[in-house]
Amino acid sequence: MSAAQPLPHVSTSPPDHDQQRHDERLSAGLERPAELAPGVLAIFTGRAGGVSAAPYDSLNMGGSVGDDPAAVTANRRLVAQACGLPLGRLTWMHQVHGSAVSYVAAPQPASPAPLPKVDAQFTDVPGLAMVVMVADCAPVLLADPKARVVGAAHAGREGMAAGVITELLTAMSGAGADPAMITAVIGPHICGGCYEVPAEMQARVAAQEPEAACVTRAGTPGIDIRTGIEAQLARAGVQQVTGDPRCTAETPGLYSYRRDGRTGRFAGLIWLSS
Ligand SMILES: [Zn+2]
């Protein structure tokens, strides 16, 4: 490890109770979307309330994880209803753990049209929900309520290291957003205490994002996705960062690929109210 890199830290986040209350509201399954900022609504889905059978039980949003497509469509319709939006106003990505970003100007054509192979999307069109699906990677939602631009990113180990958050912020800024006005929410993901990786993988990720290297609770090399994302947000000038304190691998009410292997995906959604 070079002298320029900080020492790996043990991942712990002290609880902030006011924040936790807000986060619990934002993550309260299908109860209702939360107002993230004036004119901006967001929600993180959970596992409960859907129709999928085990091991996808029950609110699986993922269409390419082996679940019954009819069940996935039914689940997506339930989420759209909870958001007060027609299903066709939810826009989806073909996530590939990269850093490409797409601007969404209109509802997506009905399937089977191919989805864009991107890991972040943003819009300035009211009532179009940007959807990101995860099961250990971090769903990151961004909003500039003044410029009325919102975005969603899929930021796991690879996407975070590749700079997907920075790329999304750059693209949103190009559409008039100001990082100083942006509110960011980092949704549930696997925590650094749980996320053990081989030492060579940690070194490769740390070469791209040094802040993300950590030591797991087992004392082994780890990746702290959240710290990496927070560093990238701070460098870009985003000051308002909130998050959901839950670790997917430690929370039975959330899907975790690391814990369960064959499983579903939960989602983060963000949209401008009309
Ligand atoms: Zn954990």
Image: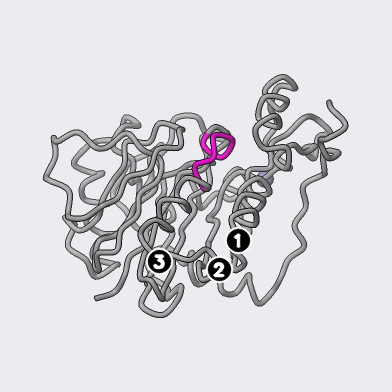
The CB of the residue at mark 2 lies under 8 Å from ligand 1: no
Quarter occupied by the C terminus: bottom left
Q: CA distance from mark 3 to mark 2?
A: 20 Å
Distance of mark 3 from mark 1, alpha carbons?
A: 22 Å
Percent x, y for residue 246? Answer: 61, 55
Q: Which mark is residue 42?
A: 3
Secondary element under disc 1, as helix, strand or loop, is loop
How far from the left and from the top, in percent, is residue 253? 51, 53
- Residue 44: image quadrant is bottom left
Residue 202, image quadrant: top right
Quadrant of the drawing holding the N terminus: top right
In the picture, the disc for residue 180 is 2
- Closer to the chain start, of discs 3 and 2, is 3
Q: Nearer the viewer, residue 203 or 88?
A: 203
For marks 2 and 1, the one nearer the N-term is 2
Q: At 29% across and 59% down in the image, what residue appears?
A: 129
The magenta segment: 159-165
Q: Are marks 2 and 1 in contact (CB under 8 Å)?
A: yes
Per the image, label 2 sits on a secondary structure element best described as helix
Q: Can residue 162 be found in the magenta stretch?
A: yes
Q: Badge 1, how many Cα within 10 Å: few under 14, some, many 20+?
A: some
